[in-house]
Every structure is written in structure tokens, then in C-alpha cells.
Image (cartoon, grey):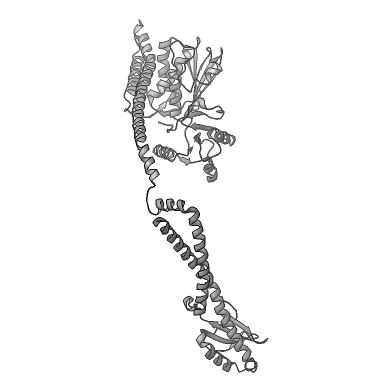
């Protein structure tokens, strides 16, 4: 009952206060209008009464008597104007108005075709306008509205009393409903149990990830080190004198592989590598290891900024695959920003080719595990390039590595933290970066970008109607070529990858 009375008083007081404010505001304009109307009537009455006096030219007497008569009503100025000559004939002030134009507190009354009388009154004090009759009128109207509000409030309270008590009890009186407290107590135990289970699952998941990482590390080490060990074995079995330069190069590769894989904290310096020189050194090892001919064709040599051990590992894996699937010679061609490794072997079936670069998958090798090709792809993407395979069964396979200098990065991702991380890395590498939360934002900014710009598009764009692959299709129609899908999904999830150079993770693509 106390709560209900409190709500009733609060509601009624609020309604009456709001009503009073609106009543006074609405009446203000009416009161002022009545005020000026009364002044105008008084002025018109005086002009009519003094008509003969004005027409006979006794202007000073008219002005003097009018000023005395209306002084108590707030008169500021009374002047007589000659409309023909556009000048003041007589006035009660030294500097009279220079024109006769009516407005709120000013009246310009016409006497005849040649004469007008100008009246100006003071702006009223709003509170001084409330006379006793007017106050009684307001109170009468206000009492009627008050009765109406009380009636409506009582009706509302009767219908919604319980709901209002609960609402104001929670919001205004800051009292928790008993049923909420009971629900909280009953749920507290299960919630704590779930939290503990989540912690245990997170701990188990961390342990599993560490275990998988160690297993993957061992697989990579075993895979990558096989090739230089095989070369070393061949060198040691030769009856002729061992080429010390080749032997030194092989042992250096073994050291690089072990250091790179076993010491994750080691950061090898990136250097500018001459591709022709790097391949010539590697080909010497591979010809000894496989006892096969490898032909190097240099059309347009170039340098690549990267880690030497990673480049050697990438090219070594590609050459090994080419040799193992072919009985004839291997051809390696260096052209402008491209390395092509080609063989005339058995080729790769189309259904295998579609998934070969998305996960470790071996085809046609008794002891293969598919790591080599995937590692080559990851390295190529890490330096801003792309790996592409062309293959026909019983004809041969061509692996094309394309390395393009990154001129600018356009990154579309609705995750602001991801965009911030990319922006910082681009700043470190002096790469122009343009980050957008949506494709619509990219379009609205209307910035002209080079056709050589690299686009990295998230697949799940929450602020757009299009997904990442659809955005890439539109960009391809605009003439852009370097289009990458940057997503947390695996490549198998996507069907339409016609214009996508590569499917990358959410992390920064360059190391």
C-alpha cells in the first residue's frame, strides 16, 4: 500500500508539473498578443480623436498631448511622418525613427494620404502581464486539467497497479524482486560448475595444441632434412674428390634447417637474395643428390628480400617433387618476378590438384606426406607472392611462383583489432596501408588505387550484404588482380575461388 501511494504521488506530481509548464508556455504568446492589441487600440483611439488637429497641421500639440496620455502605458516614441517627403514632421524624442513600418511593438497608423503616425511601446516584462483576472482564468483551466489527470491516473493505477509497483520497486526503489534472487541462488552453483569445466577444457586444449605443434615440428624437421642428408650421403660415397664448396653448402643447409625449426625464438635476418645465384648453388646439390639433369633458364633475373633458409627449403621441395615424378630432365626458368619449376612426368589428377595446396596431401609417393608443397606455398605467401600449379596427367606439371613487389595494401575486415595489427606491421615495413571495416566504406571513400594494389578481404563481412568472395569478384571486374581471401576458414569451405590468388589466415601475410 505504501508503495502504491508513493507511485501515485510521484505520477501525479510529475503530470501536474509538466502540465503547468506547458500551460504557462502556451499562454505566453496569447498574453503578449493581447498586450499589444490593447496598445494599438489606445493609439488608434487617440489618432481618431485628434484627426482634425492633425489635418490642420497642429502636429506638435498632437505629439505633446499623446505623449502625456500614453506615458503610463510604456510609450517610447510618437512621431508624425510626411509620406510624400519621407521625413519626420514632429516627434516627442530627439532622434526619431527614420521610417514608419509596423512590427510587434511598433504601430504605423495612416491619417490621410500625406500623413502617418508612428507609435513605439516598451517590450513588456512577462511576469508583469499576469493580472488578477488572468491568474484566476489560468487556475480555473488548470484545476479542470488537474481533475482530468487525477481521474486518468486512478484508472491507470487500478488496471496496472501490480505491474507499476514491481517496476518502480526495481528501478526507483532499487529493490530486487524475490523471484530474481531465488533464480540467482538456484543458478549460482551450476554456473560455477560450468566455469570450472570451461577452465579445464581450455587447459586441455592448450596442452593439445602444444602437443600438435611439437609433432608438426618433428614432421617438418624430418621432411626438410632428408634432402641435404641424401646429398651428403652421395658425396661421401663418391670415389673422386669431394667438391668442398658443395659439401660446405650442404652442411650449411642442415644447420639452417635445424636452427630454424628447433629454435623458434631465432629470427633470421631478411636479406636481398639473387635468385639466379641461389638456384645455381642449389641445383649443384640436387644434381648430385638425384643424379639427374636440371636445366636453368634465366630470362630476367631478380632479387627477393627474404630469409635464405626459407627460400632454399621452398625451392628444394619443389625440385625434389619434380625429380621424383619425372624420368627426364627438369627445367627451371627465371623470368620477371617469377620462378617456374617444370617437369614432364606423370602429372596430377584434377581432383587431387584442387585440394593439394589446402592441406598436407601426398600423391604418387610411397613415403610422401605432402608437407613440402604446403611449405612452399606458405613461404611464397609470406613474402607477398602466390604459388600456382598447372598439371596434366601423363604430360607433366608446372609450378609457378610469382613474387610481386607490394605497392600498397587494401585490407577489408570488420575486426578493428586485426586492422590495427596490420597497420602497425605495414608501418614497420613502409608499405602504404588502407584499412576498411566494410566494402561499403571502401567504396564511399572513393580513393584511387593502383591496379597493382594488393587486396586482403575477410570472408565474413558483418556490415555488408556481400561476402568476401563476392567482393573479390566485383574487384576483379574493376581490373584488380592481386586479390586474397583473408579468413579463419580453411580453403575447403569455399567453392567460388575463381579470382582468388590465395586463401590466407587472419594474420599479417608477410614475415
Q: Does 354 sit left or right of 420 as displayed?
A: right
Q: Nearer the viewer, residue 33 or 486?
A: 33
Quadrant housing residue 233: top left
Q: Nearer the viewer, residue 224 or 354?
A: 354
Q: Nearer the viewer, residue 155 or 90?
A: 155
Q: Does 420 sit left or right of 55 as displayed?
A: left
Quadrant housing residue 114: bottom right
**Does residue 487 appear anywhere in the picture?**
yes
* Location of residue 326 with respect to 198 vertically, above or below: above
* Location of residue 15 with respect to 90 vertically, above or below: above
Q: Does 283 sit left or right of 349 as displayed?
A: left
Query: Dividing the image into 4 quarters, which one contains the C terminus?
Result: top left
Q: Position of residue 43 (x, y in %)?
A: 59, 85
* Location of residue 64 with respect to 404 vertically, above or below: below
Q: Position of residue 211 (x, y in %)?
A: 35, 22
Quadrant housing residue 320: top left
Query: Dividing the image into 4 quarters, which one contains the N terminus?
Result: bottom left
Count the numbered circles shown: 0
Q: Position of residue 61 (x, y in %)?
A: 57, 94
* Location of residue 485 with respect to 449 vertically, above or below: above
Q: Position of residue 169 (x, y in %)?
A: 40, 52
Q: Residue furthest top?
A: 239
**Does residue 99 appear anywhere in the picture?**
no
Amino acid at each position: 500500500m505504501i508503495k502504491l501511494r508513493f507511485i501515485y504521488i510521484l505520477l501525479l506530481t510529475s503530470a501536474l508539473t509538466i502540465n503547468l509548464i506547458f500551460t504557462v508556455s502556451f499562454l505566453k504568446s496569447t498574453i503578449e498578443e493581447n498586450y499589444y492589441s490593447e496598445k494599438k487600440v489606445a493609439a488608434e483611439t487617440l489618432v481618431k480623436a485628434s484627426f482634425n488637429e492633425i489635418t490642420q497641421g497642429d502636429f506638435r500639440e498632437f505629439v505633446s498631448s499623446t505623449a502625456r496620455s500614453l506615458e503610463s502605458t510604456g510609450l517610447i516614441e510618437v512621431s508624425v511622418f510626411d509620406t510624400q517627403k519621407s521625413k519626420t514632421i514632429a516627434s516627442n524624442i530627439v532622434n526619431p525613427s527614420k521610417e514608419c513600418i509596423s512590427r510587434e511593438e511598433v504601430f504605423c497608423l495612416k491619417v490621410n494620404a500625406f500623413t502617418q503616425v508612428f507609435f513605439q511601446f516598451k517590450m513588456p516584462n512577462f511576469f508583469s502581464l499576469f493580472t488578477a483576472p488572468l491568474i484566476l482564468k489560468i487556475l480555473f483551466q488548470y484545476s479542470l486539467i488537474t481533475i482530468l489527470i487525477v481521474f486518468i491516473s486512478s484508472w491507470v493505477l487500478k488496471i496496472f497497479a501490480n505491474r507499476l509497483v514491481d517496476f518502480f520497486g526495481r528501478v526507483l526503489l532499487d529493490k530486487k524482486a524475490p523471484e530474481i534472487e531465488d533464480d540467482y541462488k538456484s543458478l549460482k552453483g551450476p554456473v560455477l560448475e560450468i566455469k570450472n569445466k570451461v577452465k579445464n577444457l581450455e587447459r586441455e586444449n592448450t596442452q593439445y595444441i602444444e602437443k600438435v605443434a611439437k609433432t608438426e615440428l618433428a614432421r617438418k624437421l624430418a621432411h626438410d632434412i632428408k634432402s641435404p642428408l641424401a646429398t651428403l650421403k652421395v658425396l661421401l660415397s663418391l670415389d673422386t674428390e669431394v667438391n668442398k664448396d658443395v659439401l660446405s653448402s650442404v652442411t650449411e643447409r642442415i644447420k639452417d634447417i635445424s636452427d630454424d625449426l628447433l629454435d623458434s625464438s631465432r629470427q633470421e635476418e631478411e636479406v636481398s637474395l639473387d635468385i639466379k645465384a641461389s638456384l645455381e648453388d642449389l641445383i649443384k646439390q640436387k644434381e648430385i643428390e638425384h643424379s639427374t639433369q636440371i636445366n636453368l633458364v634465366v630470362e630476367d633475373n631478380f632479387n627477393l628480400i627474404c630469409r635464405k633458409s626459407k627460400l632454399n627449403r621452398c625451392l628444394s621441395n619443389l625440385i625434389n617433387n619434380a625429380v621424383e615424378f619425372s624420368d627426364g630432365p627438369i627445367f627451371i626458368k627465371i623470368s620477371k618476378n617469377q620462378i617456374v619449376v617444370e617437369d614432364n612426368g606423370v602429372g596430377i589428377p584434377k581432383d587431387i590438384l584442387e585440394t593439394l595446396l589446402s592441406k598436407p596431401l601426398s600423391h604418387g609417393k610411397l613415403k610422401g606426406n605432402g608437407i613440402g608443397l604446403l611449405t612452399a606455398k606458405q613461404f611464397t605467401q609470406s613474402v607477398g607472392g602466390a604459388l600456382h600449379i598447372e598439371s596434366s596427367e601423363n604430360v607433366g606439371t608446372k609450378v609457378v611462383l610469382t613474387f610481386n613487389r607490394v605497392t600498397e595494401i587494401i585490407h577489408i575486415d570488420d575486426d578493428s583489432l586485426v586492422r590495427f595489427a596490420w597497420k602497425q606491421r605495414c608501418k614497420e615495413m613502409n608499405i602504404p596501408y588502407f584499412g576498411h571495416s566494410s566494402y561499403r566504406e571502401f567504396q564511399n571513400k572513393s580513393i584511387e588505387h593502383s591496379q597493382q594494389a594488393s587486396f586482403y578481404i575477410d570472408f565474413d563481412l558483418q556490415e555488408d550484404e556481400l561476402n568476401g568472395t563476392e567482393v573479390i569478384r566485383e574487384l576483379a571486374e574493376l581490373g584488380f588482380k592481386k586479390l586474397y581471401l583473408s579468413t579463419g576458414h580453411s580453403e575447403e569451405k569455399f567453392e567460388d575461388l575463381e579470382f582468388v590468388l590465395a586463401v590466407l589466415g587472419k594474420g599479417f601475410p608477410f614475415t
